[in-house]
Amino acid sequence: MTDPLLAIEGFAADGFSAVRDAFEAAIATDTETGAALSIWRHGELVVDLAGGIANARSGQAFGLGTPSVIFSSTKGLASILVARLVQDGLLDYDAPVADYWPEYGAAGKSNTSVGDALSHRAGLSAPRHDWTPDDLIDWNRATTLLADQEPLFDPGTAWAYHAITHGWLTGELVRRVTGLLPGEYFERLISSPLAVDAWIGLPAERRGQVANMVVGDTLATHVAAQQSDVRAGASVWPVRALTLGGALPLALVGPNEGFNRSDVQAAQIPGAGGISSAHALAKIWSAVVTETDGVRLLSDETINRASRVQSEGAPFFDSPAPWPRWGMGFQLDSEARRYLGESSLGHDGAGGQVAFADLDERIGFAFVTNRMEAVDARGTDIVSALKKAIS
């Protein structure tokens, strides 16, 4: 259904009107961008909303099925894949990465565990040598560069956010034990059984349908401040973690730049390159914690194991508090990213994307937007409204 006054498509079930209000507030000032929100509870869809503009140049509306780049929310999907392989006995969080990927043991990394790689403790958050855009989209080249690299710190002794590189670490583990690239395993395990529009590597027939990502004012200001800080002597490594030394713009997107490029969207970049509708993403997270359309992805036991805190507190490279907390690749509830509570696991994404599941409430949640901001309460306010609605 469509509300012509507010140009909001979709519905919110009884008891979730405050969630709809929070979504309307999130897009109220948008004239060139939009967003979508989907929430599942106990395997049933209870909120499905969309509004605004997906592409101002074409006039494409942001609808319930609009695919959008989800950035680091992709890490959550990749972590589901790894957790399922652990559940099936094909991977062990405590085993060395080199047991599955022998080349990775080079340059002082032989003792790096799978858990270290998942929880941002591998010391490979940024490349020592500049990557090119061609390196970014070449799976074998990217994984070889990481396997050959000396870590930036002793693996397992500290954490630093692996903004982009995380996906090749998890994805190559998937490839080594399944014989499938992570996008192919994702399709087999998740997107095909659930019949959802979500990809790690956009298929050619969907090219041109993805929401155009727009850099908002607060993100533009934040990027300028990061660049200024580096010029003034701040550590370059957090910046290089995002740009890979030149393969990506610092904002991750621009007009036909970064993740707005069709070749980048088509590539398998499981650290940041996933593309999904909010409806699909929330359904996936629902299937993590409860049977959804006949699919249950992870057991409660697996979720509890993967949700144990592995990394928290101050990172290796200085950054201001509050800091996030990490399980085995999953982002956990913290002051830096509020979910519903201690039983939540998921992953947010650059610019305002929020996606998670909650085991106690059996909820799957996703908010996606193509207006990217650095100072952004949209998703947080919607989660807060949801928390009140179910309390």
Image (cartoon, rainbow, N blue to C red):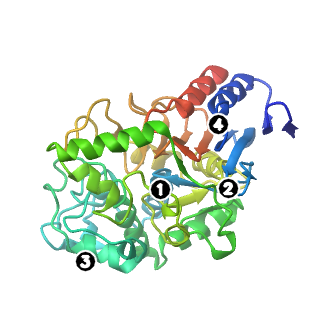
| First-in-chain label (4 vs 3) | 4
Kind of element beneath mark 3: helix
**Disc marking residue 188:** none
Secondary structure category for the residue under label 4: loop
Identify the mark nearer the N-term, 1 or 4.
Answer: 4
Mark 1 in CB contact with mark 4 (< 8 angstroms): no
- Residue drawn at 29 percent across, 55 percent down: 241
Badge 2 local density, few (<14 within 10 Å), some, or many (20+)? few
Is tag 3's residue or tag 1's residue first in the polypeptide sequence?
3
Check disc 2 and report the residue beneath it: 57
Q: Which residue is mark 3?
A: 102
| CB within 8 Å, label 1 to label 2 | no
Does label 3 or label 2 sit earlier along the sequence? 2
Residue that appears at 26% across and 32% down: 320
Q: Which residue is mark 1?
A: 253
How many circles with numbers are drawn on the protein?
A: 4
* Residue type beneath disc 4: Asp
- Per the rendering, the mark at residue 30 is 4
Local crowd size for mark 3, using a 10 Å CA cut-off: few (<14), some (14–19), many (≥20): few
Q: Which quarter of the figure is the N terminus placed in? A: top right
Gap between marks 4 and 3 measured at Cα? 49 Å
Spot occupied by residue 159 in the image (x, y as percentages of width and height): 23, 47
Residue at image position (15%, 66%) is 150
Real-space Cα distance between discs 4 and 2?
15 Å
Residue mark closest to the camera, 4 vs 3 = 4
Look at the picture and state if 239 lies above or below 1: below
